[in-house]
């Protein structure tokens, strides 16, 4: 039962002045650089775009990320998009 409750985490975003934020419900960090952060969350893939973005704290056991920088946008997409792109990459790799 403990594994099941850990797999379904409450997703929450707290963003202060578009520059400092805490995000919960994270299962993985897909990628990050100064212009974008892509997170796998319990609500789908979350893409954060902006300038000077930094992940200041990451705790995957608790599913939490703290970040800072100038946030321009937050966008969600389905987790299936990630799996399809990984499949197509692997398919092309082993062709």
Image (cartoon, rainbow, N blue to C red):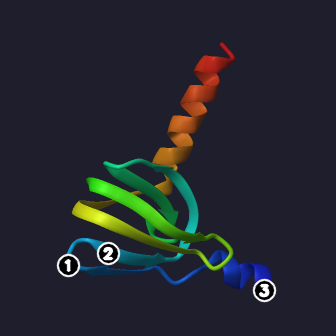
Q: CA distance from mark 3 to mark 1?
A: 36 Å
Q: Which label lies toward us, 3 or 2?
A: 2
Position of the N terminus by quadrant: bottom right
Q: Quadrant of residue 59?
A: bottom right
Dot 3 falls on a residue whose secondary structure is helix
From the viewer's side, name the closer residue of 69 and 2: 69
Horizontally, residue 37 falls left or right of residue 73, namely: right
Residue 48 visible in the picture: no
> Decide: marks 1, 2 in contact (CB < 8 A)?
yes
What residue is shown with label 3? 2
Q: CA distance from mark 1 to mark 2?
A: 7 Å
What residue is shown with label 2? 20
Q: Is residue 29 above or below residue 66?
A: above
> Decide: marks 3, 2 in contact (CB < 8 A)?
no
Q: Is residue 2 above or below residue 68?
A: below
Q: Quadrant of residue 49?
A: bottom left
Which residue is depicted at the point 58% across and 81% down? 9
Most distant residue in the top direction: 95
Q: Position of residue 14 (x, y in %)?
A: 34, 82
Q: CA distance from mark 3 to mark 2?
A: 31 Å
What residue is shown with label 1? 17
Horizontally, residue 94 falls left or right of residue 51, namely: right
Q: Position of residue 2 (x, y in %)?
A: 78, 86
Q: Position of residue 65 (x, y in %)?
A: 50, 72
Q: Earlier in the sequence, mark 3 or mark 1?
A: 3
Residue 3 visible in the picture: yes
Q: Is residue 76 above or below residue 4?
A: above
């Amino acid at each position: 039962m403990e594994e099941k409750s850990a797999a379904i985490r409450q997703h929450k975003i707290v963003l202060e002045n578009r520059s400092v934020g805490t995000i919960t419900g994270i299962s993985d960090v897909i990628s990050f650089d100064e212009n974008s952060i892509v997170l796998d969350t319990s609500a789908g893939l979350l893409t954060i775009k902006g300038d000077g973005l930094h992940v200041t704290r990451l705790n995957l056991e608790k599913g939490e990320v703290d970040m800072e920088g100038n946030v321009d946008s937050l966008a969600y997409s389905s987790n299936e998009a990630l799996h399809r792109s990984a499949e197509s990459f692997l398919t092309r790799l082993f062709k």
